Amino acid sequence: MDELLMERYALAKERVCEIKEEKAVQMPYLDFFQKTAAFLEKNVEIMDGVVFLGEAREPRKLADAADLSIDEWKELNRDLYADILPENYRNSYGNPVYACEKLGEYGKDFSFLYAELRGIVVYAFEKRLWDITVLLELFLEVYGAFAQEEVPTEEELRGILNSYANDYCQDMIEYRTRECVDPELDFAAKIIMNSDFSDLRYLYLFGECITENELGVAAFLNGLSQEEIDSCARTYTEGYRLGFVNGHKDLSKKKTVNIRYNLGFERMVKAAVLQFEEMGLKPVIYRYPTHAVNRRGSYRIGYTGAVANPQFDYDHRQDGALFLDQDFVQKRLRALQTSYEKYKELAYVHAGPACIEVFGEAPFSPVSVKEAWQFSDAQQKLEIEMQNEAGQITNRYIKGDERSFTIIAYPVPEIGGDYEEIFRQIVKINTLDYQLYQKIQQTLIDTLDTAEWVSVKGKGANETDLRIHLHTLTDPTKQSNFENCVADVNIPVGEVFTSPVLSGTDGLLHVSQVYLEGLQFRDLKLEFKDGKIASYSCGNFENEEENKKYIEDNILFHHPTLPMGEFAIGTNTTAYVAAKKYNIADKLPILIAEMGPHFAVGDTCYSWSEDTAMYNPDGKEIIARDNEISILRKEDIARRTLAVIRILPFPMMNWEASVFLERMGRKFRLLRMADLCWPERKN
């Protein structure tokens, strides 16, 4: 089989390399094929361990980082991503607007094809022969169709692309499933564990887009002592371990941990790998998905370099609309089921993700273009159905009540000139004394546990006016509504949270500006009725329908509504002080910026683990683990809300929260930060 694949690859490679000089295709399509063939040829060369640089185009061996100088690596890396960079995107076939301008009715299809073919960059560095071969063959099939005397119809072109997605669905899903649980797929792990981090050329071996952010983080970490690196890693790995301890889950049954991070943090990741090994865990480090069959929106789940152009990712977030129908849904779900069954032994011992997030990049507010692929109403329903069922399949093999996670965040140099000082401040925030905060938060919980509901109101121009209904405690001496969250799964320390009762949870949530998964939302308003989103709007676009669609795509994920899955009050005032001092409040990730009341929509706080008893440090059981939607899983698992959670932070310090302290007497008490003896109150 390998010999056959090698033969297919050799034939496809030879044919593609001929096309850039041919003129068998009529204009305007010829330009697409010639430019794309030249791009594919560059990556085929990398696959074969050769690169041509400079005007002389002399061949250079490409076996490891030392084969090129740092400047040559930068030249090669830029060359591989140049056409989709913001300054060049206007004239890129990856831009559906440009593709439609040049290629008319075929534009959307060619833009899809081009985005899919761009995956060859990372396949070439990973030496993924099968992936490269099927991409080259897809390109040649389309080229052959347009090289005929009569060009194919748009329907015929779409049929070729549709067949590609359907024919290779099983193979693509199976490989993706395997790389999520199998430590033997160790392309990234080998680079991390074997590289000389003092030589920054190692970053280019991943095949990802590398910018000053990745180089700057790596250079900064090189300046830290090994003790400092180990301490940063220990905060992260210990939080992961505590997630199992506090969740009463047995970590000893697990053998692998998924490490997700942004390039540049390899020195810290290597230290974390060694610490995880002390817990008996091997690293599973996989890249974000690149095939359209595996992608979900514009979100990058896995390790990643820089996003060369967020608008490119956004334009192609719904490329699946080209092939998504009922048959594909069933095919994809069967592929996922058979793949997990094949790798079930690896899946059963997988412990879950440990994530290092970054923040500080230039804000991105996308432009919505009609030329991009977009799901129809019917496809939106199919997408929800597919993701719900896929979540259930995954949960059967990587059981929710047996896995955990942790998340920590650090800044990148783009955050500003005080980068090193800001980084050290974030380290301080991530390592605050959780025992001190545990006591402070217990005071808050003791008060909240006397309440029937919480009222949250905005101040000034903020229109927030919400009433959050709490669960009834049948035995307050042994039960609590709120979890005392210290630095385990969510690092840093600092919040108390609950899953509200939906009935009676009503009102308006207004957020002037927030970034969710890298996307900016301005003047976001969500109105809740009985705990579910009843209406919504934002101010990103002039057209109201575009604003609604933006929310539907990126918060509701095409659900007609989502419930309020979480209500929380953040307590980390050290983060607030840092935000004010360095003027970075708008750049802090939600993970750190959880100050004051904040919310999540989607599944409950205890998604897939509602039946597992949870306890606070004081011994009280947290009983607010279900709501009226999640409990439906006991009747029909498909009726639970898809576990997609979007946290919506309230503007820092711009809030008032009042609670009913006497259920019948209706007496109020206003809770303010200063009332709770915060350690940073003097600041």
Image (spheres, rainbow, N blue to C red):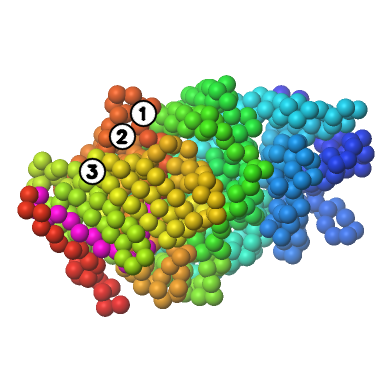
Q: Find the distance from the CA under tag 3 to the CA under tag 2.
A: 14 Å
Q: Amino acid at mark 2?
A: Ile
Q: Earlier in the sequence, mark 3 or mark 2?
A: 3
Check if mark 2's residue and mark 1's residue have beta carbons within 8 Å.
yes
What residue is drawn where x is 80% and y is 45%?
102
Q: Find the distance from the CA under tag 2 to the CA under tag 1.
A: 8 Å
Label number found at residue 629: 2
Q: Earlier in the sequence, mark 2 or mark 1?
A: 2
Q: Which residue is mark 1?
A: 639
Check if mark 3's residue and mark 2's residue have beta carbons within 8 Å.
no
Q: Which residues are magenta?
A: 647-663
User: Residue 682 colored magenta?
Assistant: no
* Secondary element at image label 2: loop
What residue is drawn where x is 16% and y is 48%?
452
Q: Where does residue 440 sit, x and y in percent of width and height?
A: 21, 63
Q: Where does residue 203 sit, x and y in percent of width and height?
A: 63, 57
Q: Residues within 10 Å of mark 2 (few under 14, many from 20)?
A: many
Label number found at residue 552: none
Q: What residue occupies the far bottom of the structure in this picture? A: 682
Can I make out residue 87 in this image? Answer: yes
* Secondary element at image label 1: helix
Q: Tell me if residue 339 comes above or below residue 316 in the rendering.
A: above
Label number found at residue 504: 3
Nearer the viewer's eye, disc 3 or disc 1?
3
Between 480 and 528, the one lying in front of the other is 528
